[in-house]
Image (tube, rainbow, N blue to C red):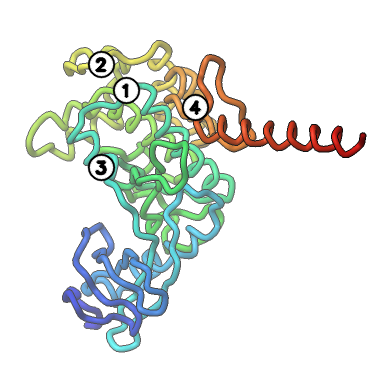
Amino acid sequence: MRGLSRLEPGSVFADDFRVVRKLAQGGMGTVYLVEQLSTGCRRALKIMFAQTVDDGASRARFQQEAQVGARIESDNVVQVVAAGVDAGTGTPWLAMELLDGRDLGALVAADGPLDPATARAVVEQLGHALGAAHRVGVVHRDLKPENVFIAAPRRPGVPFTVKVLDFGVAKVLGEDVSGATTGAMGSPMWMSPEQARVTGRVKAATDVWALGLIAFWMLTGRYYWNATRTASPAMMDLLREILVEPIEPASERAARLGSPRALPAGFDAWFARCVARAPEDRFRDGGAAVEALVPLLGDPPPRDPPRSVSTPPAPGRRPAPWAVALAVATATVVVGALILWMVLGR
């Protein structure tokens, strides 16, 4: 069997990455914090699990993450900066931008449900990523809080930057990039009915189902499904809720689960359209779903207006001392020049 079971701190992988430490482990591989020797930049390096390296379908799903991400024109999709296969071990790898922050799952678990204004900022950026993906025929099909990363911003005027992670199991509509034609992939709590059925075919509306459940969870701090109330949810109970049982209005479910926040007016109808069991009854794609949700969440968080030297001070605000000094000096020079001209002119 080819592949590596782990990377040790201090070791050099693929002749270009010095390992600092392990960051996380996902469904398809392990992620490490590394220093890229050729650039001096710190990166997130994902290597494929050793036990799946020799499986052709698993390799295709892992390697497509770089290819699929490159198709999506959105700053809200994590950037893959390099990819390859280590010559010595045959291990596929991806080098990604290193993000500073935490995933949405960890954020809500630690801080509780988001206020509507913060939730609006999250879904606006998440909608940009999904809308861009769906426009080029890419369905994420494993959308969940752990794959929505809340990163520290790299530009002023925004509270954070949302990055969608893990397009390794994405489906490119009309192509067989992942080696699968059905939608039987995803995480159970966020999985749509068509993914729960082996013969179900995924489309953009598949991600809309997960988006509705994530929005409910962000605003209430509660998972929607009753089966998740137990420490060890039974898969059959969860599938029965997804596929068969009536889907209770979001506000009623939130109240019954003891949500500390009431859902915004109009959320019930929006949520019901997201989790319609027939894909054709949902919003057509993530962009359309977010466009309908944003007005329900109120005004965006306040932002400081950009300031420049040409921007006049706000009414009632005293000008800065340096501005006063500059104005006085300028007036003095002008008056002096005028007096000198009058004297010499005569």
Type of residue at label 3? Pro
Above or below for 268 versus 228: above
Type of residue at label 2? Arg
Q: Secondary structure at mark 1?
A: loop
The residue lying toward the viewer, choosing from 180 and 294, is 294
Residue on which the image places disc 3: 188
Comes first in the chain, label 2 or label 1: 1
Above or below for 102 versus 33: above
Q: Quadrant of residue 119?
A: top left
Disc 4 vs disc 1: which is toward the camera?
Answer: 1
Tell me the distance, in whole angstroms, between the alpha carbons under discs 4 and 1.
29 Å
Q: Quadrant of the N terminus?
A: bottom left
Can residue 5 be seen from the camera position used here?
Answer: no
The residue lying toward the viewer, choosing from 318 and 269, is 318
Q: Are marks 2 and 1 in contact (CB under 8 Å)?
A: yes
Q: Position of residue 325 (x, y in %)?
A: 56, 34
Residue on which the image places disc 1: 115
Q: How many marks?
A: 4
Horizontally, residue 322 falls left or right of residue 338, namely left
The residue positioned 44% from the left and 30% from the top of the image is 278
- Dot 4 crowding, Cα within 10 Å, few <14, some 14–19, many 20+: few
Q: Secondary structure at mark 4?
A: helix
Tell me the distance, in whole angstroms, between the alpha carbons under discs 3 and 2.
25 Å
Comes first in the chain, label 4 or label 1: 1
Q: Secondary structure at mark 2?
A: loop
Q: Which mark is residue 281?
A: 4
Comes first in the chain, label 4 or label 3: 3
Tell me the distance, in whole angstroms, between the alpha carbons under discs 1 and 3.
26 Å
The residue positioned 32% from the left and 22% from the top of the image is 115
Horizontally, residue 182 falls left or right of residue 327, namely left
The residue positioned 52% from the left and 35% from the top of the image is 322
Comes first in the chain, label 3 or label 2: 3
